Amino acid sequence: MDTPVTQSERYLAHLCTKAFLHLWSYPNLYKDQGKRGGGDGKELCDLAVIFGNDVFIFSDKHCVLKREGSSPQALEQAWSRWYRRAVIKSAGQIFAAERWFRTFPDRIFLDRKCQNRLPIAFPTNPTIHRILTVRGAAVAAREIWGGVGSLMTTNSKIAACEKTPLRLGAFDESGQMFHVFDEVALDCVLTTLDTVSDFRDYLVRRERFFRAHRAILAAGEEELLGYYLFSDSKSDERGHDFVVNDQVTEVVIDESFWEGWMTSRQKTAKEKADRVSYCWDGLIEKFSFHMLNGTQYFPTAGGVKEAEVIVRFMAREPRMHRRLLAESLLEAMDTTPVGRIRRRYYPAARPDEAWWTFLVMPRPPSVEREKYREMRINYLTWQCMVLRHMHPSALDIVGIAVDPQEGEITEDALYLDGRVWCKELDDEARELRSVGGIFTAGVRTERRRWEYPIPGEPGDDGDV
């Protein structure tokens, strides 16, 4: 993988890798269009996040907004030049990258010589999220109206904002959506919504909001984000949304929302509660590292492309769910009695997500490490089969097996596709449950927790 060539690109890559993890974040991808001899692949995009069916294409531009004078005319001229280069040109580059992704998904490379192909499968019918990151206007914005230097966010057409200084548009002339983030917005969004699911949900609901209301003006993207974080979805979907009365035709979001979020008890409580969830991120990175380096204890026959489904389900979980899963796994590791096995399972939060099952299994002193790992992966396989037998709706099951919190800790994971099922497998799973006593004692866990567990308020202990 080639290294990002500018400081701006390096920073974008750092933010995305931190939020979306290494296996799915690819800076400076290349295409073999026009390639001759030793290799002169053309850069495809500044960065892409390829996660299941979702593809996030980033175009990053850093150019300073310079005014020649302080008159309104000088600002308009400087803005028009900056906007054409930073926004309009970038939108065209994203469209070109999108066409290549859709037309030649098997000709995407990590290096300019086009020798190393993308290691994960590219979706056949991707959902594309177009993201423009534009930098260099913050200093001018602070000089003009103070604040943090963010640009106003609107749901206007992109071209229309060329003549309106310090405003960012969203739609091209054909109605295609672009998410345009300045440097202030990029930091706020990617450090707050730091999982693929949380970020994707924000973009999807942001686009729905922009299309549903006639005129939207936010003092900055961070204010839009603050409004989102304080509003719960009106539907049965997970998480937050932009809640506005259906009769409203104009929405103005002022400068109070981000400051309100940053100083809120909700934010403080959430950050404290979320600390444990980053153990889940670390586990994803550990599995990903061994997959990419070929050092898995139980390698899959299909290599990275087959094994990636396991960690993709792990990474699909939003921050709130990672908190619950990490708490449960660590608690089970800490409290499993010596010489005993502990099993747990959790139903999927939504139909397109995984069922989870954990196995904490100590190694008997008389059993060698290699034999123990084989025994443990077999037990985990049986556990997943029994879960599928018990719950026919469990179509995607991911099992994770670990040692208790003592001595060397190793982890194994496997995926069971519940769609590939038959009477023979169901009969075998029934027998395993009967003879092995797997999940006969009612160990399903469905504890819920508040996203913002405010001390002293009902539910602050986390149980509902």
Image: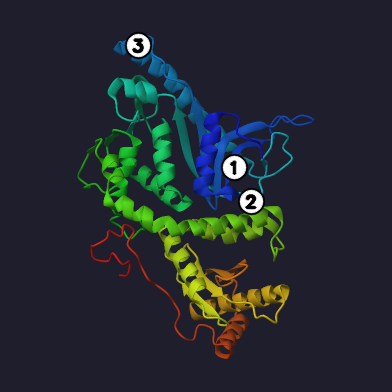
For label 1, the crowd category at 10 Å Cα-Cα, with few meaning under 14, some 14 to 19 and many 20 or more, is: many
For label 3, the crowd category at 10 Å Cα-Cα, with few meaning under 14, some 14 to 19 and many 20 or more, is: some
Residue at 50% from the left image edge and 41% from the top image edge: 15
Q: Amino acid at mark 3?
A: Ala
Q: Is residue 371 above or below residue 43?
A: below
Question: Could you say where residue 26 lies in the image, as x and y percent from the top left?
Answer: 59, 42
Secondary structure of the residue carrying tag 2 is loop
Residues under numbered marks 3 and 2 in contact, where contact means CB atoms less than 8 Å apart: no
Q: Quadrant of residue 87?
A: top left
- Asked whether the viewer can see residue 417, the reply is no
Residues under numbered marks 3 and 1 in contact, where contact means CB atoms less than 8 Å apart: no
Residue 74, label in figure = 3
Q: Between 114 and 67, which is closer to the camera in this rendering?
A: 67
Residues under numbered marks 2 and 1 in contact, where contact means CB atoms less than 8 Å apart: no
For label 2, the crowd category at 10 Å Cα-Cα, with few meaning under 14, some 14 to 19 and many 20 or more, is: some
Secondary structure of the residue carrying tag 3 is helix
